[in-house]
């Protein structure tokens, strides 16, 4: 069973690599030569790093990894968090530009909200790297670095398919789905990646979405907030599962939404505990994975992404060709942004220790 799952995941990974034109899916070597510029070159160069919020765990890690990697490479860093407030992020970006940064790295709260700042950057000749989330509706975006977002969804969908043995089991199984923030371009990729795997089984009736909510819009979670996902899950449990019907599986696009669903189940549900997916390997979710309350997550090592972006910054500022491995997938409604997609990794109770503790991502104590 385990072997089968690994091989299915592997073929999903390979298929997506082919689909996205990914030439270097393994992201090998990024760690070793991430800082292509020497300290002398970087000296005096300032990088503005705009992060969406400290409220969701991963951005703290992304911000601090970016800051330490950039500083180690010799750059000055202006790191700002925008408290999930679009206006604050707009102001912070404009300030970074007027205070004279040489490159901007932006993880947007809402991908379509930074047009004015991006225009300012373009006029000032400041290259912009979209960090993890694509910046939409603008031709001022120079590069995009992210994890392969469609592949994240494929890994989640394939996990469900294998865990329920959908090709052989009789079913039907009850499925609910919780997706991400409609303002985040990634959210659709995650949802579609998973849905494309599950769709045939939904269509043949082997997977039954009892709430009837199957579109991204019906499943979305504004702001990716756990509380919002929890409220929606409570409403679904009350209206569709209060009569003792079991929910067999709950697809959650990421860990903050999975946490909301897990909280809703703990408070309002006593049936068979469902399979639950996630993404990010947040601390709370990894603890839940260890406790059997979440089945899997997708690990996106933020250290890898930070190194990749520092490498991009160095290549841009030293006028070298910038490494990208996807020039087809990420159209932001104005241009197709040359992208570097890092590879997301499947995580569960069996491999979390190696991935997260042995690699130094978390200490053992953080997961207690
Ligand atoms: C990221 C995910 C994250 C989500 C909420 C997305 O843009 O790609 O890793 O879970 O935002 O923070």
Image (spheres, rainbow, N blue to C red):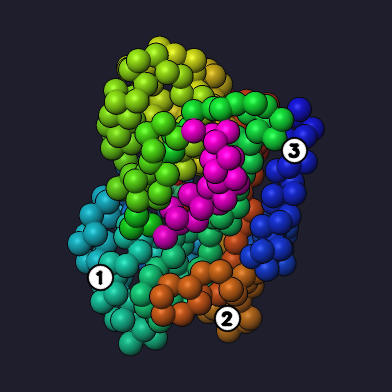
Identify the element where label 2 is drawn. Answer: loop
Q: What residue lies at 71% left-to-right and 63% top-to-bottom?
A: 18
Q: What residue lies at 29% left-to-right and 81% top-to-bottom?
A: 120
Residue 365 image offset from top left, x and y in percent: 52, 23
The stretch in magenta equals 185-208
Queried whether the magenta region covers residue 206, the answer comes back as: yes
Q: How far is mark 3 from mark 1, CA to CA?
A: 47 Å
**Residue placed under numbered mark 1 in the picture:** 95
| Image quadrant in which you'd find residue 107 | bottom left
Residue 355 image offset from top left, x and y in percent: 65, 36
**Residue placed under numbered mark 2 in the picture:** 318
Identify the disc placed on residue 6: 3
Q: How far is mark 2 from mark 3, CA to CA?
A: 41 Å
- Is disc 1 surrounded by few (<14), some (14 to 19) or many (20+) residues within 10 Å? some
Residue 231 drawn above or below residue 150: above
Q: What residue lies at 64% left-to-right and 53% top-to-bottom?
A: 343
Q: Are marks 2 and 3 in contact (CB under 8 Å)?
A: no
């Amino acid at each position: 069973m385990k072997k089968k799952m690994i091989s299915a995941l592997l073929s999903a990974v390979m298929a997506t690599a082919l689909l996205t034109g990914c030439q270097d899916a393994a992201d090998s070597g990024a760690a070793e030569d991430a800082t292509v510029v020497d300290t002398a070159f970087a000296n005096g160069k300032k990088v503005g790093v705009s992060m969406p919020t400290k409220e969701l765990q991963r951005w703290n890690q992304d911000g601090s990894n970016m800051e330490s990697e950039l500083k180690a490479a010799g750059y000055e860093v202006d790191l700002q968090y925008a408290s999930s407030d679009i206006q604050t992020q707009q102001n912070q970006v404009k300030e970074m530009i007027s205070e004279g940064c040489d490159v901007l790295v932006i993880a947007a709260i809402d991908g379509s909200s930074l047009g004015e700042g991006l225009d300012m950057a373009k006029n000032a000749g400041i290259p912009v790297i979209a960090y993890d989330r694509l910046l939409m509706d603008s031709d001022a975006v120079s590069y995009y670095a992210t994890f392969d977002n469609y592949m994240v969804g494929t890994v989640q969908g394939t996990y469900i398919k294998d865990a329920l043995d959908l090709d052989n089991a009789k079913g039907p199984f009850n499925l609910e789905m919780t997706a991400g923030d409609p303002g985040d371009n990634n959210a659709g990729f995650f949802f579609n990646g998973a849905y494309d795997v599950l769709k045939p089984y939904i269509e043949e009736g082997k997977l039954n979405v009892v709430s009837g909510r199957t579109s991204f819009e019906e499943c979305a979670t504004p702001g990716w907030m756990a509380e919002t996902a929890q409220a929606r899950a409570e409403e679904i449990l009350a209206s569709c599962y209060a009569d003792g019907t079991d929910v067999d599986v709950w697809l959650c696009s990421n860990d903050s939404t999975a946490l909301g669903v897990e909280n809703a189940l703990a408070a309002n549900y006593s049936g068979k505990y469902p399979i639950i997916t996630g993404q990010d390997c947040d601390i709370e979710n990894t603890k839940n994975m260890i406790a059997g309350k979440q089945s899997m997550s997708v690990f996106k090592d933020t250290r890898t992404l930070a190194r990749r972006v520092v490498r991009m910054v160095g290549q841009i500022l030293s006028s070298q060709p910038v490494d990208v491995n996807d020039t087809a997938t990420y159209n932001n409604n104005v241009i197709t942004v040359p992208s570097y997609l890092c590879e997301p990794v499947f995580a569960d109770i069996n491999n979390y220790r190696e991935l997260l503790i042995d690699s130094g991502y978390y200490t053992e104590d953080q997961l207690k």
